Amino acid sequence: MSMIDYHVHTTFSDGANTPQQMIDEAVRLGITELAITDHYDPFDPTLARFGHTPEELARHFEVIRACAQGKPLRVFCGIETSTGPDGRLRVPPRVLNMCQTVITSVHYLEGDILVHRGEYENDAYWHAYKRKLLEQAAGPGDVLGHPEAYLPIGPMLEEGTTFEDRQVICARISEKYFDAPFIDALGDALTSSGKAYELHGATNTPREWVVRRLHARGVHFSIGSDAHGLDRLGCNRRAVALWQELGLYVRTL
């Protein structure tokens, strides 16, 4: 079974390491297929500091291909992005044409839903998130990124919240709001669009019963660590174990 990681970031967006460093570490770890999928979303307020253009992305892909030259692994160029209120991708066609894989994730919500610091269980907010997730599942792109992890809780976060705290908060939200009927609806949207559901290595999500339920509905999966540094690269042990145990349909590039 190939060792794959289809979701990693570099210094082109919010990663800590260069493409060369990520590729060299992937070789050392024995990864055979790697997709570098930096953030690219002109409308995401959390990414405004990068200010990337299509020309800069093209040069970034050239750098990746040069770094991968002669290495004993296959390296793919892609992006992680989001969609507008209508569920459509908001990147120009020439960007999509450059990409070998496109991950869509919900990193923020648009609209006027009132939230307060520390108020994590906001029904209106999470119903809006679920609607956007369903739109993304049914829409363009190749992979639905981390639906139960890295939830858009930024407007609610209290000062001093740690990464571990965030994981606990996201798990609590998932338990309350992402029930079986919603997972079934998500699965139907994914099978209709042909999009894969991401097994997220950084947070070991989604919950196992969710994987089993989606698999029973014929959903395909993608494996990605979402590594933003060398320490997380290839951390997909749980995802690979589920792949082997359940005979999942795993998308390969």
Image (cartoon, grey):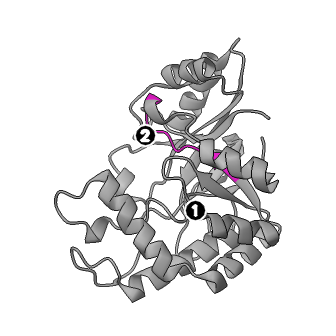
Q: Residue at x 56, y 61 (%)?
A: 90
- Residue toward you, 78 or 145: 145
Q: Which quadrant is home to the N terminus? A: top right
Judged left or right of residue 177, residue 209 is right
Above or below: residue 1 compared with residue 215: above
Q: Is residue 54 visible?
A: yes
Q: Secondary structure at mark 1?
A: loop
Report the residue marked by disc 2: 13
Residue 106 is situated, as x and y percent measured from the top left of the image, at: 50, 64
Cβ atoms at labels 1 and 2 below 8 Å apart:
no
Q: Secondary structure at mark 2?
A: loop
User: What's the CA distance linking mark 1 and mark 2?
Assistant: 25 Å
Q: Residues within 10 Å of mark 2 (few under 14, many from 20)?
A: some
Sequence-first disc among 1 and 2: 2
Q: Residue at x 46, y 28 (%)?
A: 230
- Residue toward you, 147 or 175: 175
Above or below: residue 174 compared with residue 17: below
Query: Which residue type does callout 1 highlight?
Result: Pro
Q: Residue at x 52, y 44 (%)?
A: 226
Q: Residue furthest top?
A: 70
Total marks in image: 2
Report the residue marked by disc 1: 206
Query: Which residue type does callout 2 highlight?
Result: Ser
Between circles 1 and 2, the one closer to the viewer is 1
Residue 49 disc label: none
Tell me where the magenta segment starts and ends, as one range.
222-230
Q: Is residue 96 visible?
A: no
Q: Which quadrant is home to the C terminus? A: top right
Q: Is residue 70 magenta?
A: no
Residue 83 is situated, as x and y percent measured from the top left of the image, at: 55, 65
